Image (cartoon, rainbow, N blue to C red):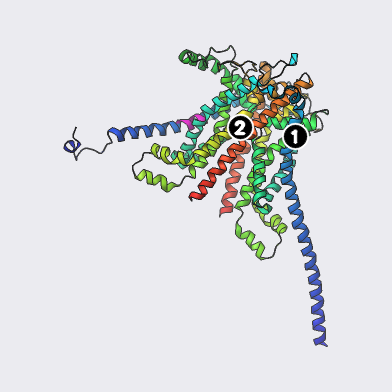
């Protein structure tokens, strides 16, 4: 067909032939990408819905404070103790490593430490479990402390990375003003840099706590032989805890155990989601404050 | 009188001021050193931790390493009751489940990254991006528990029969087992785990692609897909590969969720719908009830293999990522 002769200037401008095909292909690709995002959100919704609908029915005050088989109190307390000690270990180390990276390290030192943090972050948690078993449990006994050490190893790179990001956001003119006034390094760091980065440090810590609270693999080595009906606060012995209990219950084919596991999952998931949503909001707020 | 007293009081004040200044200076010197020392100590602690972890795992495995040597990697029997150990079938299970997870997860995750960086309106982006990251926040044990009770029955009752009926001529889609525990179910759980990792990294990569180049292509008549195909993907390819390797590292090392849904089989089978086991899942399943010292040492040996694979995939990802960022810096 001869395009020149068929051309009708009054016809609407619609693509035809090759351009039409390209447009359609592009449109299909756009729908595909949107569908992928919808799929991910749908999976999240299904998982959360299942946990909520099956877990919430088991939930009442008795369930939260009694020991097994009626409730999950000891596990909640044990997890709180383990994660609490882990935070006390990991937070100073993480913040100091971040300070080292931003304030003191030379090029090569910073490179080495950053690589180390990335490797720590990528380490399978079960390897950390083997490590803690070899170091603290083998030939001795399981303990909450061992579990805390394992979780601290998982938390340190997360806290260090998050803290480093906010330390880099501290306005340069604050530091320069301190330098101009002849303030020494450590006073500047403790008096100016850390306080203005505090929001970010707390966010990173909360996010790492949310991650550590659900970590199961290391706890199987460190604190898995416990009595779920008895409260315990002593970190020198094996503490009941939420993740290992869910794991054990899911391996038994016992419907009553499943109900308890759904309840535990519900409590854990809601704490974790609440913490990470809150931390993100906090981060956004402190970013905005620092930018203004 | 006054003329003589003036300088003396002045000098006295000067002396006392210089003394306090000196004290302050000394304190500052100590403070600076102390802060530096503490920070250095924390940094060295991290390096020591990595070294100690590697040492402890190898040390725990040493009886098995000296007994079986490298033959352990290819030996496929694992019978603790008879004192026979080999990692062959576990390496196979790990490779297959992670590979399938990456095959399913990476394209979806990259599409999500594209959606979040180029397509989504900013209001939607602010909601969807945190939701996708929240998928990574769900503890693996709960995802695994959900996998056992919700996903596995669906896979066994609906998905696997359909795939078997439709594509049954390909040996990997064999007849479904009676329980939903299979390598395929484990791969689906791992897919859910790798998607948020790859998606958030690749979204950041795509956002860094210069806007003016994309707009230029658009002005020349390229469709949105053609802009992605010709500009966005090629310029971020190595970063996307690095992100996928990070996801792969996560999938290889996941122990708990896999242990819950994979069914702890010990044979190498072509069908994805049979039970299998991975290195990490075998450790998690058998370590608490390990029968003998050699059994324990063999499980540690599995840990050594896992550590080597994990560190390797991580280092390669780092290396690719660094090359990529250098090239980006040069281009700018």
Image label count: 2
The residue depicted at 76 percent of the width and 57 percent of the height is: B31
Q: Residue at x 54, y 39 (%)?
A: B201
Q: Earlier in the sequence, mark 2 or mark 1?
A: 1
Identify the main secondary structure in magenta.
helix
| Residue A35: numbered disc | none
The answer to whether the residues at label 2 and label 1 have Cβ atoms under 8 Å apart is no
Please tell me whether mark 2 or mark 1 is closer to you in this view: 1
**Residue A261, magenta (yes or no):** no
Q: Give the x, y percent position of residue B302.
A: 69, 25
- In what element is the residue under mark 2? helix
- Residue under label 2: B249
Q: Label 2 crowding class (10 Å Cα cut-off): few <14, some 14-19, many 20+?
A: many
Q: Tag 1, which chain?
A: B
Decide: is B26 above or below B68: below
Residue A76 location, x and y as percent?
72, 30
Q: Residue at x 61, y 32 (%)?
A: B249
**Residue pictured at 36% horizontal, 40% vertical:** B222
Q: Which residues are magenta?
A: A35-41
Residue to which mark 1 is pinned: B55
Q: Quadrant of the C terminus of chain A?
A: bottom right
Q: Residue furthest left?
A: A5
């Amino acid at each position: 067909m001869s395009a020149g002769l068929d051309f009708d200037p009054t016809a609407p401008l619609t693509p035809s032939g090759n351009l039409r095909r390209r447009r359609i292909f592009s449109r299909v690709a756009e729908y595909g990408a949107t569908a992928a995002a919808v799929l991910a959100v749908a999976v999240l919704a299904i998982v959360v819905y299942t946990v909520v609908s099956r877990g919430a029915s088991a939930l009442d005050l008795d369930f939260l404070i009694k020991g097994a088989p009626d409730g999950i109190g000891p596990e909640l307390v044990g997890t709180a103790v383990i994660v609490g000690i882990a935070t006390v270990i990991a937070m100073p180390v993480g913040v100091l490593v971040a300070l080292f990276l931003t304030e003191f390290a030379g090029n090569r030192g910073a490179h080495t430490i950053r690589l180390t943090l990335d490797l720590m972050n990528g380490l399978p948690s079960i390897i950390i479990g083997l490590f803690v078993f070899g170091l603290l449990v083998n030939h001795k006994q399981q303990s909450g402390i061992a579990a805390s050490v394992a979780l601290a190893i998982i938390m340190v790179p997360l806290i260090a990375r998050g803290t480093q990001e906010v330390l880099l956001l501290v306005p340069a003119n604050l530091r320069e003003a301190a330098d101009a006034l002849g303030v020494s390094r450590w006073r500047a760091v403790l008096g100016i840099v850390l306080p203005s980065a505090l929001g970010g440090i707390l966010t990173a810590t909360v996010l790492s706590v949310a991650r550590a609270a659900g970590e199961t693999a290391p706890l199987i080595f460190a604190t898995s032989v416990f009595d779920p009906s008895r409260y315990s606060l002593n970190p020198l012995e094996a503490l009941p805890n939420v993740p290992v209990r869910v794991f054990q219950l899911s391996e038994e084919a016992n419907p009553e155990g499943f109900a308890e596991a759904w309840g535990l999952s519900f409590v854990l998931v809601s704490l974790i989601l609440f913490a990470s949503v809150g931390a993100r909001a906090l981060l956004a707020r402190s970013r905005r404050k620092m930018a203004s | 009188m006054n003329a003589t007293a003036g300088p003396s009081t002045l000098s006295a004040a000067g002396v006392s001021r210089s003394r306090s200044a000196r004290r302050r200076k000394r304190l500052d010197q100590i403070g600076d050193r102390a802060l530096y020392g503490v920070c250095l100590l924390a940094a060295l602690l991290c390096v020591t931790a990595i070294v100690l972890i590697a040492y402890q795992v190898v040390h725990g495995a040493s009886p098995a390493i000296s007994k079986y040597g490298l033959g352990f990697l290819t030996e496929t029997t694992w019978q603790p009751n008879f004192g026979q150990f080999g990692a062959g079938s576990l390496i196979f299970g790990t490779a297959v489940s992670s590979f399938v997870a990456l095959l399913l997860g990476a394209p979806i995750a990259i599409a999500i990254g594209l959606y979040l960086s180029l397509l989504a309106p900013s209001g939607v982006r602010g909601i969807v991006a945190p939701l996708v990251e929240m998928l990574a926040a769900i503890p693996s044990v709960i995802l695994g528990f959900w996998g056992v009770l919700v996903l596995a029955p669906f896979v066994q009752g609906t998905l696997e029969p359909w795939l078997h009926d439709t594509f049954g001529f390909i040996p990997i889609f064999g007849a479904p087992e009676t329980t939903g525990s299979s390598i395929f179910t484990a791969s689906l759980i791992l897919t859910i785990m790798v998607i948020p990792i790859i998606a958030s990294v690749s979204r950041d990569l795509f956002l860094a692609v210069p806007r003016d180049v994309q707009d230029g292509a658009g002005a020349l008549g390229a469709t949105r897909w053609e802009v992605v195909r010709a500009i966005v993907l090629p310029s971020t390819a190595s970063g996307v590969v690095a992100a996928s390797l990070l996801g792969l590292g996560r999938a290889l090392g996941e122990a708990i969720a896999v242990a819950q849904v994979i069914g702890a089989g010990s044979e190498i089978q072509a069908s994805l719908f049979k039970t299998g086991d991975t290195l990490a899942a075998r450790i998690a399943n058998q370590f608490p009830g390990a029968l003998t010292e050699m059994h324990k040492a063999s499980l540690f040996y599995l840990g050594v293999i896992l550590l080597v694979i994990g560190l390797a995939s991580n280092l390669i990802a780092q290396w690719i990522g660094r090359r990529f960022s250098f090239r980006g810096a040069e281009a700018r």
